[in-house]
Image (cartoon, grey):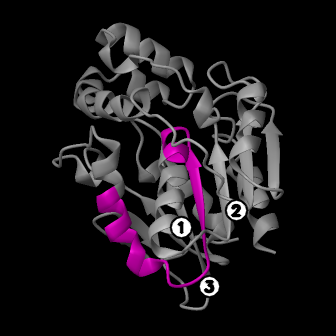
């Protein structure tokens, strides 16, 4: 295990490219988060995959760009950015909002281009047909942040930095607008190998919510559960990486 040195910041992702003959892994971050949160995966996976940590606008090194509040617009632009990199075997990993994006992007590229991931990893998101109308993006600042902090993915340093929180809130609200307004296409059967990931102690997404994904996929459907909450992997990226490596081989 070693951290790669060939890391580049690109407009739509942090790229860790090692070889043209390696499979690609695309990682889609959660609402209010960014690509850097997932750099802890690199030491465990960067000798096996060319890794692309997706960076949506409105955060980190794209902080000056406007975040999306319409999923269709985001998917169209993301599709254009990633298509040139989908000419070799690839996998998608998405967490929470990132799972929604990975799922919808998989549907689009399969429908429009006949391309599909070798494997799809969807983490901490309830099956899309269970989605109900929610308005988290409309909550007052204090109430919204309380709900986000309860999920466990925010560091104590960030949660006490009022200036940083003020910068994050507009992007967080737009991310949550995407999630709150999301509706799954009907009669969707992707028939793609998928692993659904989640934590036993996730107060936002239950085990039942995760198992319900079965209706969206064919026979190659798995659920892997961890002893943790919504961000079950934050102290154990190695365990998450090991599951991804299992599906590579």
Q: Mark 2 and 1 residues: CB-CB less than 8 Å, in contact?
A: yes
Visible residue check, residue 6: no
Q: As drawn, is 220 to the left or to the right of 83?
A: right
Q: Is residue 62 magenta?
A: no
Q: What residue appears at the point 30 percent right and 25 percent down from the top-left corner?
A: 165
Q: Earlier in the sequence, mark 2 or mark 1?
A: 1
- The residue where tag 2 is placed is 192
In the foreground, 5 or 74: 74
The picture quadrant where one finds residue 243 is bottom right
Instruction: Provide the residue span drawn in magenta.
Output: 76-100
Residue at the disc numbered 3:
22
Residue 110 image label: 1
Image quarter for residue 80?
bottom left
- Under tag 3, what secondary structure? loop
SS at circle 1:
helix
Give the quarter of the figure containing the C terminus.
bottom right
């Amino acid at each position: 295990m070693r951290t790669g040195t060939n890391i580049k910041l690109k407009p739509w992702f942090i790229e860790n490219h090692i070889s043209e003959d390696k499979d690609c892994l695309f990682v889609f971050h959660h609402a209010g988060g960014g690509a850097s949160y997932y750099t802890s995966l690199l030491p465990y996976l960067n000798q096996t995959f060319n890794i692309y940590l997706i960076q949506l606008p409105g955060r980190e090194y794209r902080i000056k760009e406007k975040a999306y509040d319409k999923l269709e617009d985001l998917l169209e632009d993301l599709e254009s950015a990633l298509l040139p990199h989908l000419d070799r075997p690839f996998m998608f990993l998405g967490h929470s909002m990132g799972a929604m994006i990975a799922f919808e992007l998989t549907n689009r590229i399969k429908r429009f281009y006949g391309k599909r991931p070798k494997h799809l990893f969807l983490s901490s998101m309830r099956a899309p047909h269970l989605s109900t109308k929610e308005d988290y993006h409309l909550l007052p600042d204090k109430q919204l942040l309380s709900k986000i902090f309860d999920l466990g993915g925010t560091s104590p340093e960030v949660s006490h930095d009022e200036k940083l929180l003020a910068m994050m809130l507009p992007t967080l609200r737009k991310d949550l607008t995407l999630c709150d307004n999301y509706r799954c296409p009907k009669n969707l059967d992707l028939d793609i190998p998928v692993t659904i990931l989640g934590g036993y102690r996730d107060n936002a997404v239950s085990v039942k919510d995760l198992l319900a994904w079965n209706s969206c996929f064919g026979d190659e459907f798995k659920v892997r559960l961890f002893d943790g909450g919504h961000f079950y992997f934050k102290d154990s990226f190695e365990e998450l990486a090991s599951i991804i490596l299992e599906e590579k081989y």
